[in-house]
Structure formats: C-alpha cells, structure tokens
Image (cartoon, rainbow, N blue to C red):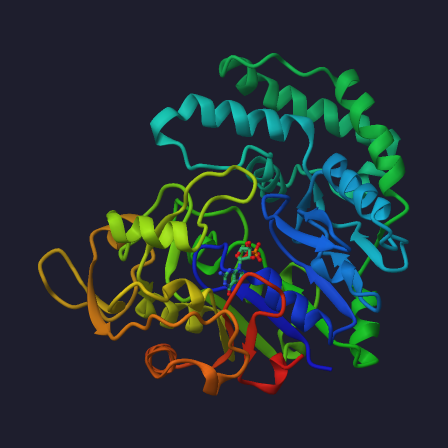
Amino acid sequence: MPNIVVVGAQWGDEGKGKVVDLLAEKGRWVVRFQGGNNAGHTLVVDGAKVVLHLVPSGILQRGCRCVIGNGVVLDPGVLLREFDALQASGIDMSPERMIVSTEAHVILPWHRALDRARELAAGAGKIGTTGRGIGPAYEDKVARRGVRVADLLKPGMLRGKVEEALARHNHELVRLGHAALTVDEVMAEILPLGERLGRWARPVVRLLHEALGRGEGILFEGAQGTFLDVDHGTYPFVTSSNTVAGGACAGSGVGPTAIDAVVGIAKAYATRVGAGPFPTELDDALGERLRQAGQEFGATTGRPRRTGWLDAFMLRHAAMLNGLTHLALTKLDVLSGLGPLRVCVGYVDARGASVDEVPAGAEELAAMVPIYEELPGWDEDLSRCRVWEALPPACRAYVTRVEALVGVPVGALGVGPGREAIIARDAMFAA
Ligand code: GDP
C-alpha cells in the first residue's frame, strides 16, 4: 500500500478531512506530524458529533492505527479529554491503535498563558493565534528547553524542568499583567496528566519502519496549509511548524524515500483566516457570497474567513514546495451560480513588472497585483454528481484549466460537504 502525504495547498481549511478519511480507508496507519490542537475536524459517528483536534481521523476506521508524531506539540489535558470523548462514543482507544511519540513536545500551562497574554497585549498587531500555547511550546522546543512526553513520565526530573521554565517565563507573564505561575500548581496539574498519558506513549520510529517493511501503508496527515509554513509561508503571518510535505519526514522519523505520493488539497477558490497578505482577496459583495455559499466561518470560533479567487500561480508554487503528485480540489459546488469565474495566473509588482515567482515574504506578497484569467461559470447544482462526465462542461473546463496552470493532475473533486460528495478521477481516490 502506498505511503501518502496529505497537505493543505493554501492557507488551511481546505477540507482535508474528507480526503484524509477516504485515503485512510486504504492505509493501516495515519500519522500526524506537525501542529497542535488548533486544527479541528468535526465528524459524525453514528449520529453523534465528535470533534478531533489532535487524534487523526483514521481513528474512526476500525483497521487503522494512529500515531501522534514527534513533530506535533500536544496539550496533554486536551488530548486526554479527546481520548475520553472518543472512548465514550464507542471507539477503541487502546494503546495498540493510538500511539503518542515520547519525543513529541508538550504544551504546558505557561505556554497557554503566554500565548493569550501576548495576543492581548499585541492589540492590533496580533498574529491571530488560537491562544492554545502552540507557538510558545514550539519556541521552547527550538530553544532546547522544551518538555517532551518522555519528560512528563519522569516526575523526579520534571520538577526541575518546571522550575527552570517558570524562572524564565514568569517575568514575561507578570510584565504582561498575568499572575505568576507557581511550581506547585503546575506540578499538581501536569503530574496526573503525565501518569495517564504514559499508557499511550512510546518511541514510534521503529514501529513505523516495521510497518513500512510490512508494506502496510502510512498516511501522513498535515494540518493547516502550505502558506502557513514557518519557512515557506507568508512570514511572519505563519504557524510555528513546517506544514509542507517535507515536514512529514522530520515530524515522524520516516525518510523521504519512503513517500510514494503527495496530495495537495485546495479549495476551488481561496480563503484565509486572520491577518496576512492575500493577493486574490475579494473584499466585496462577491466575497460575501462566497463566504455564505461556502460557509466560510471558523469551526470553533465562528470567525468569518477572508475569501477570494483561486490563485493558481500560488498553487503552482505549492506544487513545487511540496512535490505534489496529485491535487484534490474541494468545494467546487460552492462556485455554482457565481457567474464568470476568475483564476489568478501570475502577478505584477507595484511598478507593473511581471514576476516569475511567488515572493516568500509577507510585505513583498502584499504588494503584488494579481493577473486574472476569466473563465465561464456554471449554474448547475453539482452536489449529486459522482462522476466526472456528469459535471457541466464549464465546470470541467475550469478544473482542466487549473490543472494545466498548476501542472499537477486533479485526482479528486469535492462537490458537497458530505463524505460521499466526492468525484474520483484517479484510482488512488476511488472508494
Ligand atoms: P480542514 O481544516 O482542511 O481539515 O477542513 P475540514 O475537513 O474540517 O473541512 C472544512 C469544512 O468544509 C467541513 O465543514 C466540510 O464539510 C466542508 N467541505 C469539505 N469538502 C467540501 C466540498 O467539497 N463542498 C462543500 N460544500 N463543503 C465541503
């Protein structure tokens, strides 16, 4: 079975859940390799809603084993609550099928407190983080003073680490108007969590390599999107980890030669949450129509997402950054009845000179003016189409044009919110 990396090709919220679900039916393993509990899929299991933040959605497939890799930062309290909720819905959460890497870093109370206090203090200059401590936990990781799952399991050593961390971080907390945290209160909170989490924690590298040796198929599930990557995204309006496909290797301990396919998920238009450059943004009535038709509001916050035309120039860049072998284009149904459609095919800079590459920095990107190509729209409802031939000709022409502009085949199309509302054009995506 192939080993596949799935990543968002835009700014996140591309509808990765459905495609990951579909592909997880084929693989035996699903691995999360970066990010924290800021992602959220809402899934319906036997009529009951289950929200997944960190647990890979493969957990709903009986034959699937799930791994939270070393590249993830995890909040043990949130994770254990998620485990409990899943268990309560009748899902087998035994350590045989849910494994947490001992090398993953842990989000601790000071990370959450710092995240919130800094966003409050930043006012208008804020990045728009989710306040869950993910950024500060990654900071400590890179500064080589982080606490890993393995540390959480050794209470003797843990106290010293907490003392050290608070000696450093309390200064900032107090300066930002937050109460200082005490070692005792932190220990009282995290010790029992570590004790419980121990059941699922183990080294995963050999485990995954043995799975590879047996040809069991690993699906690497990315969170957020390519242009939120800490290196390749619209810096500094980015997340704290590598969201590009290469991150799957570093964040799990599997080398690049094991990867057979890389699937980029993109919406048939574009959205972005929070601040940062967005060249094809529609700041008008059409953008609002797109927002309503696509229900572009944050899953947990209800925050409206910014909307705009599909940026094929940027997707072409995403194809390079990730080494995409396939694209999956979601929410094609949302474009029905919108009138003529535009696709961005390139940029000119502020002086009107055309550019040959998407600039990496936020300021440079914000100065870009998109060049559009206009394509005919369609009015038909797509939500019941299940084969390529059933799509209106204008819709097929749109997809074919995007494919040509990006230079990557579109293997699957999303035509509605339901799990079944998908058209496979490539055997890899066939149910
Ligand atoms: P993620 O953040 O990329 O993992 O996005 P999710 O998988 O959580 O999907 C976001 C939302 O988009 C969910 O409410 C899905 O039901 C919805 N969605 C996904 N694919 C489609 C599609 O093809 N059409 C429509 N209309 N909605 C979709």
Q: Quadrant of residue 403?
A: bottom left
Give how far across and how far down residue 286 sits, in percent.
27, 53
Left or right for 243, reference 375? right
Left or right for 187, reference 23? right
Ligand 1 appears in which quadrant? bottom right
The residue drawn where x is 73% and y is 26% is 162
Q: How many marks?
A: 0
Give how far across and how far down residue 110 sits, in percent.
64, 26
88 versus 420 height, above or below: above
383 versus 361 height, above or below: below
The residue drawn where x is 46% and y is 64% is 331
Give how far across and how far down residue 248 sits, in percent.
62, 64
The quadrant of the image that shows the C terminus is bottom right
The residue drawn where x is 45% and y is 50% is 295
53 versus 422 height, above or below: above
The quadrant of the image that shows the N terminus is bottom right
